């Protein structure tokens, strides 16, 4: 079926987005063109985001550019957050997940991924240098670093790298990691072997 070149270009870009394949891209495109105002609103929102959003120069979170061209996120600017606690995460999506609960009141550092030989991601591709600089120059000094990386082999490898870096750059800081094991509300017979093994290894006294 012959399609206009402009539509082919739109479908190609939509299909590249996470969670969308060629058929999902077609459904999105048809929904947009079924309501032209929706397409215009999306276009304007994308243009505003491209012009006004950037990466926080402190932690790596998404943030708006200020009048001076700087880009620091609200979490880093907040005077009510605990500056002595730093949570190291893989991506901005992890910050959003932790913030939804509202239980964490410290600050973050986004690595931008995890070390992966298969994906061609080396330590040099991560923001480890920025993390070391933050730890060495932080006022007040960081007292705890929480490693909130995945339980995969790549996540664990990256956690070891970060732990070594913390011990060099901020020897006063306590290293901790997120508890691993059974999710709330889960049944034992539905858990995989890896999750059950972690739950047993991190069991607690009652």
Image (tube, rainbow, N blue to C red):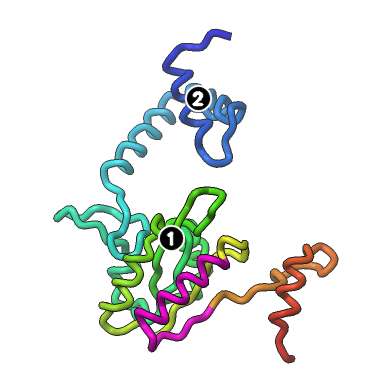
Quarter of the N terminus within the rendering = top right
Of the image marks 2 and 1, the number of the one nearer the N terminus = 2
Say whether marks 2 and 1 touch (CB < 8 Å). Answer: no
Q: State whether the magenta stretch is mostly helix, strand or loop.
A: helix
Viewer-nearest residue: 174 or 55: 174
Identified at 45% across, 56% down, the residue is: 122
- The reply, left or right, for residue 206 in relation to residue 81 is right
Q: Quadrant of residue 26?
A: top right
Residue lying furthest left = 68
Neighbor class of circle 1 (other Cα within 10 Å; few <14, some 14-19, many 20+) is some
- Label 2 element class: helix
Circle 1 residue:
123
User: Spatial distance from mark 2 to mark 1, Cα to Cα?
Assistant: 35 Å
Identified at 55% across, 76% down, the residue is: 177
Neighbor class of circle 2 (other Cα within 10 Å; few <14, some 14-19, many 20+) is many
Quarter of the C terminus within the rendering = bottom right
Viewer-nearest residue: 152 or 108: 152
Identified at 73% across, 68% down, the residue is: 195
Residue lying furthest top = 2
**Where does residue 105 sit, x and y in percent of width and height?**
43, 76
Q: Is residue 172 magenta?
A: yes
The boundaries of the magenta stretch are 156-176
Q: Is residue 138 magenta?
A: no
Circle 2 residue:
11
**Whether residue 9 is situated above or below residue 79 in the rendered picture:** above
């Amino acid at each position: 079926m012959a399609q206009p070149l402009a539509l082919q270009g739109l479908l190609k870009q939509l299909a590249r987005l996470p969670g969308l394949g060629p058929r999902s891209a077609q459904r999105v495109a048809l929904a947009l063109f079924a309501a032209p105002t929706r397409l215009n609103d999306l276009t304007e929102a994308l243009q505003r985001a491209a012009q006004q959003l950037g990466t926080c120069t402190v932690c790596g979170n998404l943030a708006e550019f200020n009048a001076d061209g700087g880009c620091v996120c609200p979490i880093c600017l907040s005077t009510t957050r605990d500056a002595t606690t730093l949570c190291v995460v893989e991506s901005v999506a992890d910050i959003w997940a932790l913030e939804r609960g509202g239980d964490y009141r410290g600050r973050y550092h986004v690595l931008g991924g995890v070390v992966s030989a298969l994906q061609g991601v080396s330590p040099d591709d991560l923001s480890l240098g920025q993390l070391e600089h933050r730890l060495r120059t932080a006022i007040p000094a960081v007292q705890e670093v929480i490693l909130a990386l995945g339980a995969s082999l790549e996540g664990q490898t990256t956690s070891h790298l970060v732990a070594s870096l913390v011990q060099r750059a901020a020897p006063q800081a306590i290293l901790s990691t997120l508890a691993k094991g059974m999710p709330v509300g889960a049944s034992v017979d539905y858990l995989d072997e890896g999750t059950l093994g972690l739950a047993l290894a991190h069991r607690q006294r009652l």
